Amino acid sequence: MNPKVQHLLDDWQATQPDLYTIAAAVRTLILQNFDDVSEEVKYGGILFAAPVPFGGVFVYKQHVTVEFGAGAQMDDPYGLLEGKGKGRRHLKLHTLADIQNKHLTDYLSLAVSAAQKT
């Protein structure tokens, strides 16, 4: 594991243990479901590429955000994506159950596909 990623995870665990649990579960989901995923710390979160950059996970004060770099080009089959910018969209996760409830695995697949097309 990249030492910078480990340091950020350790920081989240020490300062926001409840949100760390969500962020760590998101990271595990990404690493288990996509081949050749790389990760790096940038902008205060962990960015993922498979092999092109497709998104990241960020811990805020009261939620975890999963950002999708090409989110504006993604289908939104569940109507859950947030954001109005030219490119990015995101999902806010407040609980571990939100990973399932907000269909994160489906959105991650859509994000990888959209990123590969850009």
Image (cartoon, rainbow, N blue to C red):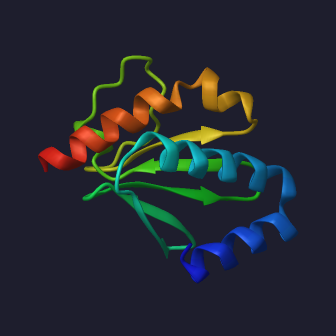
Between 25 and 91, which is closer to the camera in this rendering?
25
Question: Which of the image's four quarters has the N terminus?
Answer: bottom right
The residue positioned 62% from the left and 32% from the top of the image is 99
Q: Quadrant of residue 61?
A: bottom right
Q: Is residue 88 above or below residue 91?
A: below
Q: x, y percentage for residue 16?
A: 83, 61
Between 33 and 85, which is closer to the camera in this rendering?
33
Q: Is residue 12 above or below residue 102?
A: below
Q: How many marks?
A: 0
Q: Is residue 116 left or right of residue 42?
A: left
Q: x, y percentage for residue 72?
A: 27, 40
Between 75 and 4, which is closer to the camera in this rendering?
4
Q: Is residue 109 above or below residue 64?
A: above
Q: x, y percentage for residue 28?
A: 59, 48
Q: Is residue 57 left or right of residue 62?
A: left
The residue positioned 65% from the left and 39% from the top of the image is 93
**Residue with the most extreme left position:** 117
Q: Quadrant of residue 100?
A: top right
Q: Is residue 33 left or right of residue 100?
A: left
Q: Is residue 31 above or below residue 16?
A: above
Q: Is residue 50 left or right of residue 47?
A: left
**Residue with the most extreme top position:** 78
The residue positioned 58% from the left and 81% from the top of the image is 4
Q: x, y percentage for residue 49?
A: 34, 59
